[in-house]
Image (cartoon, rainbow, N blue to C red):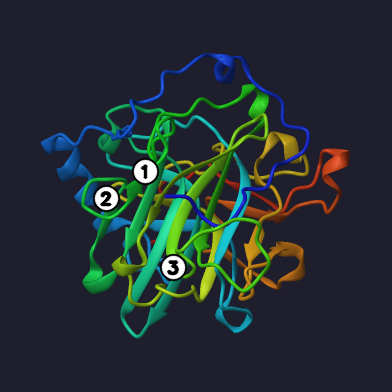
Amino acid sequence: MEPSFIISKQKDQTKTKSESKKFIDCPNGTVPILKNTKEFVTNAQYWANKHFNSFTIDSHGTHFAGVRASQDQGPYHGVEAWMSLHELNISVDQTSYTNIYVASAVSDKVNFIQTGWMVNPTLFDDGRPWSYGLWKGINRTGCYNTICPGFIQVSKTDPLSIPLSPLPKGEIGTYLSIKQNIRSNMFQNYLSKDKETGNWWAADVKYNGHGMNIGYWPKELFDLISTNAGMVGVTGAVQASPSGKSPPMGNGYLPTKNEMGSARVRDANIIDSNFKVIGSKKYKLEKILDSDKCYGLRDGRKKSFDEGTYVLFTYGGPGGDSCGV
């Protein structure tokens, strides 16, 4: 029930008042699970069918802005990134989200896992940003969060899906990661018998640098990413309403030279074919922006974390009626 990796800690992360509150752990042998009402399950299935494909646009009204590492540089065993968190005004027939993902595709078959934050009033019954997880596996099975059998919740304190509170003045939000739990032949100072589990773990890192393993998707759910992934990426995305109006993305504004005032992603780390954590600057990242009328994507300034301004890219926009299909 524990992964083989150790979650990295980030510098200059301060504990917020909300995190200083005391929370009650679930009793031993139990974990927190979001209640699956009939309406929630129905809405989740609807949005899962409309959710964008990690490789191509296969849903009318989907737009996105971000970066990805392509197949010719893989295979990959995970990705992690810091992303800013924002409140957005989204109508009940729209959704806007930012995520990291791992994926592979062969012909018309696709496997992927995503985790990040989302504003979706229909799914969550409110307009707050929520963390979420989504997977697609064998025979196109898959779902959000724990709607269907698949994701194994492990943490007694941190559910996969929970409402999030943006920090004041657009400060960097939650650290999200997906890593594959396959133990290589590296020296490790512990004993375990799950040398090659192949499970994909979701984890986050709090503002004080404390890491938490949330849970995992068993490798048996997948046929294309059971051993590795052909692509990893970090992206913002939206789904327009049936009328064609697209919602805001990121913080709702086009990115500017003022990076701290824009929706942004800090440098992503990629877990390579040898299970080493490599900074994304060592990879050739493909930029993805399909609607420059409504959204933007800008390279970030390559400064160190010590200077407090390292940003991989800024993104987002207001959306509107003329974003294209």
Residue bearing mark 1 = 95
- Which three-letter amino acid code belongs to the residue tagged 1? Thr
Q: Nearer the viewer, residue 12 or 32?
A: 32
In this picture, is 183 found above or below 118? below
What residue is rendered at 39% in x and 41% in y? 160
Question: Where residue 116 sits: x, y (%)?
Answer: 48, 46
Measure the alpha-carbon separation of dots 2 and 3. 28 Å
Label 2, residues with CA under 10 Å away: few <14, some 14-19, many ≥20: some
Looking at the image, tell me whether mark 1 or mark 3 is earlier in sequence order: 1
Label 1, residues with CA under 10 Å away: few <14, some 14-19, many ≥20: many
What residue is rendered at 37% in x and 28% in y? 127
Please say whether residue 133 is visible from this viewpoint: yes
Q: Is residue 104 left or right of residue 43?
A: right
Residue bearing mark 2 = 47
Looking at the image, tell me whether mark 2 or mark 1 is earlier in sequence order: 2
Question: Where residue 258 sits: x, y (%)?
Answer: 77, 39
Residue bearing mark 3 = 198
- Which three-letter amino acid code belongs to the residue tagged 3? Gly
What residue is rendered at 35% in x and 49% in y? 240
Check disc 3 and report its element: helix, strand or loop: loop
In this picture, is 309 found above or below 323? above
Q: Nearer the viewer, mark 1 or mark 3?
A: 3
Q: Are marks 2 and 1 in contact (CB under 8 Å)?
A: yes
In this picture, is 91 found above or below 178? above
Please say whether residue 92 is visible from this viewpoint: no
Looking at the image, tell me whether mark 2 or mark 3 is earlier in sequence order: 2
Q: Is residue 145 left or right of residue 11?
A: left
